[in-house]
Amino acid sequence: MTESSVEEGVPAFAKADQWRERLAEHERSGLTVKRFCQERGITQWAFYAWRKRLREEGTVRFALVERGRVRPEPAAAGLELILTTGERLRIGVGVDGATLRTVLEALRA
């Protein structure tokens, strides 16, 4: 199975998850990048590109989601999205763009 056949039609967030797992697997394997990629039929270019991309994303922080009755909160939220399902997504003033994109990709899936 080649790298392109594994990833065709896979949403972006799922590809990132697949690559996170591959990178973790590489760390556990003790293999060189070259050997690891050869054994899995992926290119070294893709390996290094994804490793760089995922490192640059940084830490993603999620808040606890409570279902059920919504309690009133102070007006400190920067933005509140009300989804078609009626659920609310509160986005704090200090959220970074990469985190917001990750959350929105997950919601679209």
Image: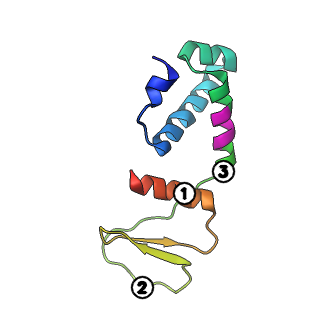
Dot 2 amino acid type: Pro
The residue carrying mark 1 is 101
Going 62% across and 28% down the picture, which residue do you hit? 46
Q: Does the stretch in magenta take in 103?
A: no
Q: Secondary structure at mark 1?
A: helix
The residue where tag 2 is placed is: 72
Q: What range is drawn magenta here?
A: 49-54
The image shows residue 19 at horizontal and vertical percentages of: 55, 34
Contact (Cβ within 8 Å) of mark 1 with mark 3: no
State the SS at label 2.
loop
Q: Nearer the viewer, residue 23 or 6?
A: 6
In the rendered image, the quadrant that contains the N terminus is top left
Quarter location, residue 86: bottom left
Q: Is residue 65 visible?
A: yes
Above/below status of 60 relative to 20: below
- First in sequence: mark 1 or mark 2? 2
Measuring from the top left, give residue 22's x and y in whole percent: 56, 29
